[in-house]
Image (cartoon, rainbow, N blue to C red):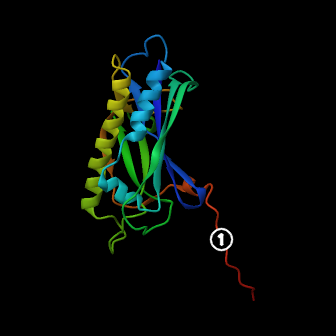
Amino acid sequence: MSYVRVSILGLAPGGETWSVNPVFDPTGEFPGGVDQTALDTACDAIAALTPNAFLTGFMSTSLQLTGAKVEVRSDTDDSLIGISQSVRPSPLSGTTSALRGAQNALVLSLRTTTPGASGRGRLYWPAVGTGVGTDLRFPVGPVGDFLSGMKTYLNGMRTALASAFPTIGFDLAVRSKTTLTTPHVNKLQAGNVPDTQRRRRDAMIEDYTSLAFP
């Protein structure tokens, strides 16, 4: 058995990269193994998807979506079975002015019927271009639009995979490397408190200002 890990790939100023990494569980096995041509087709289709205006608004014009990567991994030990990567012909930029730092994110919580941490997941979407209110929270309206936009975007990925592998269905899932299980998602949730995706500063070069003391 296997599962599919999709990575939506992006770029931030200064060479910093970011990614969003949903997992999909095939309802059946890949017939005769993973066909590379079909995997490339799925990856190209996912890379070509355009998130709706609410998601690109959260990104801001400072961030770009550059492509996608699709990995097929073993359900028993997470080893890599197949891989494909696709670059968009031109990067897709966000649509609003940057208001926050690169680490700011809005979190999509993934819920399944499996209790405990192994049945819960999170996807971090850049929240650089959306302001907060005096309560230091995102307004409820944009959060609802974000949730609806993510549902559409994730279903687009499912469709791309199913079109490339027409004998297999795909379900959005949570992958637990602790229990080696891949429970299916039955609910999406999003809160209105800005979160932090710390990995978004791995490659961002920081300029320092110094002052002698005392």
Q: Is residue 71 found left or right of 122 in the rendered image? A: right
Q: Is residue 54 above or below residue 75?
A: below
Who's the residue at 32% across and 72% down the image?
133
Who's the residue at 35% across and 19% down the image?
168
SS for dot 1: loop
Q: Is residue 139 found left or right of 74 in the rendered image? A: left
Residue at the far bottom: name it.
214
Who's the residue at 33% across and 72% down the image?
135
Residue at the far top: name it.
32
Q: How many labels, in total?
A: 1
Q: Is residue 174 above or below residue 59?
A: above
**Based on the displayed image, in which of its 4 quarters is residue 60 positioned?**
bottom left
Quadrant position of the C terminus in the picture: bottom right
Q: Position of residue 55 (x, y in %)?
A: 35, 53
Who's the residue at 32% across and 46% down the image?
150
Q: Position of residue 151 (x, y in %)?
A: 29, 42
Q: Nearer the viewer, residue 106 or 203?
A: 203
Under mark 1, the amino acid is: Asp
Which residue is label 1 attached to? 207
Q: Position of residue 19 (x, y in %)?
A: 49, 47
Q: Is residue 128 above or below residue 123?
A: below
Residue at the far front: name it.
89
Q: Is residue 187 visible?
A: yes
| Label 1 Cα neighbours within 10 Å, binned few <14 / some 14-19 / many ≥20 | few
Q: Is residue 182 visible?
A: no
Q: Position of residue 213 (x, y in %)?
A: 75, 86
